[in-house]
Each structure stands twice: as C-alpha cells, then as structure tokens.
C-alpha cells in the first residue's frame, strides 16, 4: 500500500507542483491550504509524514505541529523562508524532524521524505530482534530493533533522527564526532543539512534526557570540533 504524505501550505503553486512530484514517485498525497484545515483532516485520517509551511493563515505551522505532537510522532518536515532561523530552531525543539528553506529543490525534498520514512519503518518493523542491535553504555540502553532508548530504566521518547544521533555518539564513548559525521549518521551521505540542525537536535536530546535525570551531562560539546558521549 502506498505511503501517504500531507502537504500543508497556503501557496497553491507549491501544493500542486510538489503533489505531482510525490505522486510520480508512488506516494499518495493529501493537500491542505491552511493549518486549521490540516489539523481537522489529519486528526480524522492520519498520514505517514507531513510537510508543513511555518507561516500560514488561521493556524501557523508551529501551532499545528504542537497540536499534532499531542497525538502522533509521525515525521514532520518544515518549509521555511530564508529569514525564519528562529522559527526553524524552535520548530526542531518542538518535534519537527527536519526543515527545508524556500525556494527548494523538489528532488531534495523527496530524498528527505524517503530517508525519514525509512527510519520510521525501522522503528515499527516486526522482523525478529537482532541482539547485536542493542547497545549498552552504562545507564544508557539503545535498542536498534525498535529505535527505543532507555536511561536508567526510564524510556526516553526520541524521534528516529534523535535516536540515530545518540547511537552515533554512544557507539564509541570518548571519541569526538564532527557535525559532518553526525549528519551522515542521521541523514545519510547524500543529504546535506545545516550545522544548526545538528546543534538543535542535540539540544532537544539533552532536554529529553534531563526530564528523567536533571544531572544528565553525558553528551559533551567540543566547541569548533563537534560532540562526544562521555560514559560514566
């Protein structure tokens, strides 16, 4: 069965052209011209992934994302203008998986969608568990079979992208990972994202761990170099 993508944007030209491109790739597409309409439609009939414009009438992308995150962890990509840096970072902290600046390459958008859907499929795959996919580092346990993360026995609700970043750091404690290496781990070698995207993901990861452990400090920043996981 074809996977379904929701496009939410008040620009009809973008809705039409992107929908045509996605349908030619085999996806089913549902389009919405404002956030309020999209919220009603997506709550009634969920989709596999949503692409949201940040600035829309009636309900902007931020509010829409906040409401959607109360009921679903489906992957979300934001479309932003070149002047929306603050909104981009806030959106990622709120739970968006990625963002793309307008004007954008439709091919790049399709590749981002494919990557996120592949990761989401890994998180829900029912194939037999692989013991080798479980990584334990002190209080941290990562189950790659289900993209599940535990800290001192408590579940940390990570997106698939966040899980891949934590795994890339924890797999070799003490070794520094550059932002480029983390980009490759989370997005693949053929997709480029801005350094700020990685930084924002790391901030959100730390915040999630500190909900269950206020003293959490195992992901260290080496300014100008990258990040590393410090095992106790």
Image (cartoon, helix red, strand yellow):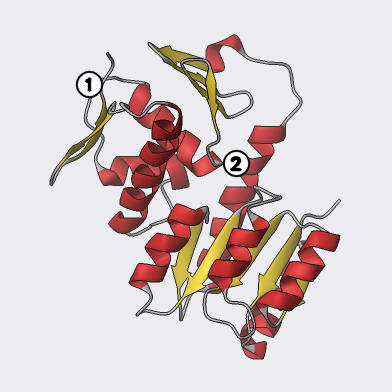
In this rendering, position of residue 199 left or right of residue 142: left
Choose the circle earlier in sequence order: 1 or 2.
Answer: 2
Q: Which one is nearer the viewer's eye here, 142 or 28? A: 142
Looking at the image, can residue 183 be seen? Answer: no
Q: Which residue is mark 1?
A: 174
Q: Residue at x 79, y 60 (%)?
A: 43
Q: Is residue 56 above or below residue 139?
A: below
Above or below, comparing residue 151 to residue 85 in the picture: above
Location of mark 2 (residue) = 119
Task: Give percent across and percent down for residue 40.
Answer: 79, 69
In the image, is 90 to the left or to the right of 45? left
- Residue at image position (64%, 47%) is 73
Look at the numbered discs 1 and 2 and tell me whether their residues touch, using CB distance below 8 Å: no
Separation of residues labelled 1 and 2 (CA atoms)? 26 Å
Q: Please tell me in which quadrant of the rendered image residue 202 appears.
A: top left
Residue drawn at the location 60% of the way across and 62% of the way down: 65
Instruction: Say the numbered circle drawn on residue 186.
Output: none
Q: Residues within 10 Å of mark 1 (few under 14, many from 20)?
A: some
Characterize the local packing of mark 2: few (<14), some (14-19) or many (20 or more) Cα atoms within 10 angstroms.
many
Task: Please provide percent x and percent y for residue 223.
Answer: 13, 44
- Looking at the picture, does residue 152 appear above or below residue 167? above
* x and y, in percent, of residue 219 in the image: 29, 31
Q: Seen in the image, is 76 located left or right of residue 129?
A: left
The quarter in which the C terminus is drawn is top left
């Amino acid at each position: 069965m074809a996977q379904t993508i929701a496009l939410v944007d008040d620009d009809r030209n973008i809705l039409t052209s992107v929908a045509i491109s996605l349908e030619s790739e085999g996806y089913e597409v549902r389009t919405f011209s404002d956030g309020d309409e999209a919220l009603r439609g997506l709550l009634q009939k969920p989709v596999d992934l949503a692409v949201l414009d940040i600035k829309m009438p009636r309900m902007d992308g931020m509010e829409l994302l906040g409401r959607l995150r109360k009921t679903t962890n489906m992957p979300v990509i934001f479309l932003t203008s070149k002047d929306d840096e603050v909104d981009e970072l806030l959106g990622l902290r709120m739970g968006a998986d990625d963002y793309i600046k307008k004007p954008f390459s439709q091919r790049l958008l399709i590749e981002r969608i494919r990557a996120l859907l592949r990761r989401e499929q890994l998180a829900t795959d029912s194939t037999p568990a692989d013991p080798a996919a479980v990584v334990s580092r002190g209080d941290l346990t990562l189950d790659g079979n289900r993209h599940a993360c535990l800290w001192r026995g408590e579940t940390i609700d990570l997106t698939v992208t966040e899980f891949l970043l934590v795994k890339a750091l924890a797999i070799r404690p003490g070794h520094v990972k550059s932002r480029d290496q983390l980009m490759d781990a989370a997005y693949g070698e053929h997709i480029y994202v801005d350094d700020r995207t990685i930084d924002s993901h790391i901030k959100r990861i730390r915040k999630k761990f500190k909900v269950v452990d206020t003293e959490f400090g195992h992901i260290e920043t080496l300014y100008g170099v990258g990040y590393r996981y410090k095992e106790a």
